[in-house]
Image (spheres, rainbow, N blue to C red):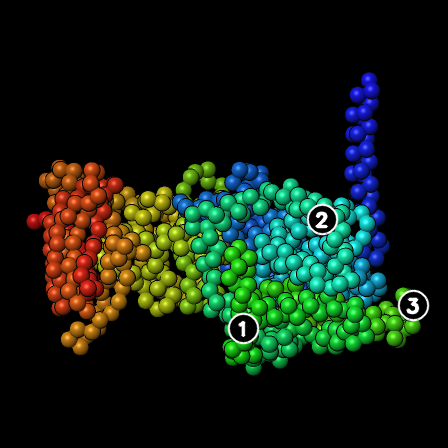
Amino acid sequence: MEENATVGHVHRAARRSVADMARGYLSCVHRKHIVAGFLYLFIALVLFYPITTNMSTVAPGTGGDVYINMWGIWWAQYALVHMPGSFWYTHLLFWPIGSNIAYFTFSPIGAILTAPFQAISVTFAYDVIFFLGFLISGLGMFILADYIIKNKYAAFFAGIVYAFGSWHTAAAIGHLDWMVIGWIPLTLYFFLRMLRDTHKYRYAIGMGVCFVFATFMGDVEQGIMTVVLLAVVFIAYAVHPDARRLLKNRRFWYALGISVVAVLVVGSWGIIPIIHGYTSPGGAANVNSRNTLANDAEWSSPILSFLLPSPYNGLLYGLTKSYGSIYSVDPNERIAYIGYTALALAIIGIWKNFKGSRLWIIIAIFFGWMVLGPYVELGNYVSSGLPGIYYAYHFIPAFNVVQEADRFYAVFSIGITMLAAFGMKYVIERFHGHAKQGSYTLAIVGIITVLFLAESTGVMGGAFAKANTTSISIPQFYKELGSINSNFTVLQLPILINNYIPFPDLAAGEATFYTSASHKPILGGYGGRINVTQELTLYSIPIVVAVSNLQLGNFSYESPVNENYTAVSLLSLYDFNTAFVTINENVLNSTELSELEAYSIKTFGQPVYADSNVIAFSTISAINASIFRSFVAYPSPLDWTNFNVFMNGTSVGLWEPTYPGEIAVVAPYASAYKGTGASYINTTVSFYGAAINGPSTLSIETPTQFSSAKTLATFTLTPSIRHYVFNVSLPSGIPGSELLFLTQGTGVAGITNITFGEQT
C-alpha cells in the first residue's frame, strides 16, 4: 500500500509539474499578443488583397518554385494518410529513381497544420501559410522586443519591421520555407530568458520546440542560422565581464542540455531522415550541388541593395527599374532594403541607448556582413575585393548548406529591428512623456508604421500583382488520370530545366504539381536543387532532350550514335511504363507547339485529349507497333563529351569516349527479319573517327559473364577522319548488350556517326 501510495504521489507530482509548465506558458499569453497578432494578420490581408480575394485560385510567386511548394504541402498530408512510411521519399517524381523530400523546399509542419484547408484547395492551404507567415513572424519579433524593451508599442513596430520588411516580403512571395521566420526570434527569446531568468527549464523546452518549428515550418537553413545566431549571442555574453557570470550558472547548462534533448525528441521525425539523406550515397553532392564561391557571390546582396526600394514594393518598384541588373539573378535573393524609416529609428536607438543596444549592434553588423557574401559587392556586380565573413563560413562543413548568403538577412533583420524599436521607444517617450498608452502614442506608432509599410512593402495590386502572383489551375486531363485505377507513368513535355529561357523551371514545376491530381508517377520533376542522377534518366530519352533544344530554336538530339531516335524514345517509354505523353501548351510559343505537335502525331498518332492547356497522347499503340523492330542504342550521357575541330577549313563535330564510352544496344527481335529465326543478330557496326592532337588507339569491348570484357575490335586512328567497320553478334530484344569504347595514347579519339545494321 505504501509503495502504491508513493507511486501515485510521483504520478500526481509529475502531472502537477506538466500542468504548472502549461499554465506557465499560457500565462505568458496576454491580450497584447492577441491584439498584435490580429493586427499583423489584418495588415497582411489588406496589403496583399489580390491574394486575399482569390485564395482558392491565386498564389504568391511565379515560376516552378510556386508549384513545387504547393506540391510539398499536398504531399505531406497525402503521404501521412496513404503511405506514412514514405513521408520523406516519393516515387511520384523522377520515376523510377524517386526523390528524397529532405532536399526539397518543404514545410512539413506548415503542411500538416493547414491540411484541413486542402478540402477547399491546395492553393487555399498554401495561401493560409502565406498569411500565417506574417502573423507568426511579426508576433515572434513582438514577443522578443517586448521582453527586451518593455514597451508594447515599440515592440509592435518591431514586429512590423521584421514581418513586413522588404526582404521578408520578397522571400514570402517566392519561397514557402521563408514565409514563416518568426520562430528564429522566438528561439532567441527563450534562450535569453533561459540565460537571465528563473524557471530556466521551462524556457529550455520552449527554446527546443521553437527551434524545431524554425527548422520544419521554415527549413533546415533556418535551423542552421538559428544555431549561428545563438553562438554569436553566447560569444557576446562570454566576452563581456558583467554578462559572463550568467554563463557560469550551472542551472543554465542543465537547461541547455534539456533544450537539446527537447529538440531531439520533438524533432527526431525530421532530423533523422535529413541526416540520413545527407549522408546517403550522393546525398552530400546533391545538397552541395551549387556550393561554390562564385555561386555564393551570385546569390549575395550588394551594398547598394540595402539602400534601394525593393522591386517587390507595390508603390515604389518603378524607382528601381534603372538598377534592374542588381536583381537580375533573382529578385527574391538580392533584396536587402532596410527602409529609411527603420534606419533612422535604429540610429536614434543607438544614439540614445548605446549600452542597451550593444548586443543588437553586434548581431546587425555580423549578419549584415554575412548577407554581403564571400566578396563585398558595391552594386551591379562591382566587387570591392574585400572578403566578407561569409568567405570563411563557406568552408564550414554542413553549415555551408546555406549557399544563398542573402538569406542571413532573416537574422540581420533581428538586430536592425531591435535597434529601430529602441528608437521608437525614445520617440514615443519624447513626444508623450513616459505614458505607455493614449491616443498620441497610437497616432505616433500608426503614422510611423504606415510610412514604413509604404516604403518597404507597399500595396500589391494591378500589373504589379499579376507579375508577382500565379493563377493556379490543374488541367482536367490530370484529374481524369487520378480516377484510373492502374499503374503507369506520365511524361510531360517539356520537362528539363532549361536555364536559357525565362522561367527555366516552370514546366517541371507544373508537371510536379499535377501529380497531386493524377497520383501517377512522372518522368522527371522539380525539387529545388538539381540531382544529377535524376537528370541523367531524362537525358537518355531523345524526345525529352529534343524538346529542350526546341525551346532554343532547334528540334534536335545530338549523340555519337546515328540511329532512329524515335525508336530509342519509344523503347525508353516502354522501359519506364509510360502510358501517356503530354504537351504543356502554356510554356511553348506557337511555332514550338506546332512543330512538337506535328512530331508527336507522327510518332504516337492522334491525341487522346486536348484543351487550351494540355495535349495528351497514348504511347501504347506506337510502342506495340515499333518495339524491337530496329536497332536502338543508348549512349551513356556521362560517357561521351562532344567537341568541334577544324579539318580542311571545316568545323566537324566529334565525340570523345570517356569513363569509358558506354553504349547500350538493343538489337531487333529476330522475327523482325524475314527468314531469320536465330536469337542473335549478326550486326555490322560502323563509325567515323580521327585522332586529335596525337596518336590514339581505339578498342571496342563488351562485358562477358566470366571475364571483365571481350575485345571486339581495335583501331589505330589517324589525324584525318576515316570510316571504320567491325562485326559483332548481338542478342535480339531485352536485355541487349553493352559496347565499351576505350582509348589509349596521347591524343584524343574523336568519333561520330556510329551506326548499327544487320550484317549482309
Q: Is label 2 or label 1 in front?
A: 2
Q: Is label 3 or label 2 in front?
A: 2
Residue 377, image quadrant: bottom right
Which amino acid type is shown beneath numbered disc 2? Trp
Pick the front one: 494 or 453: 453
Q: Residue at the spot x=34%, y=47% of the render?
A: 573
Q: Is residue 419 left or right of residue 717?
A: right
Residue 153, how many percent across, how many down?
83, 65
Q: Distance from label 3 to label 2 (Cα)?
A: 39 Å
| First in residue order: circle 3 vs circle 2 | 2
Q: Secondary structure at mark 1?
A: strand
Residue bearing mark 1 = 387
State the residue lying farthest toward the left. 760
Which amino acid type is shown beneath numbered disc 3? Ala
Q: Residue at the spot x=30%, y=63% of the render?
A: 556
Indicate the quadrant containing the N terminus: top left, top right, bottom left or bottom right.
Answer: top right
Residue bearing mark 3 = 435
Q: Distance from label 1 to label 3 (Cα)?
A: 47 Å
| First in residue order: circle 1 vs circle 3 | 1
Residue 490, how many percent across, how many down?
41, 48
Q: Distance from label 2 to label 1 (Cα)?
A: 36 Å
Which amino acid type is shown beneath numbered disc 1? Pro
Residue 496 in sight from this viewpoint: yes
- Counting other residues with Cα less than 10 Å from the Cα at mark 1, is it few (<14), some (14-19), or many (20 or more)? some
Residue bearing mark 2 = 253
Residue 611 in sight from this viewpoint: no
Q: Residue at the spot x=16%, y=38% of the render?
A: 679
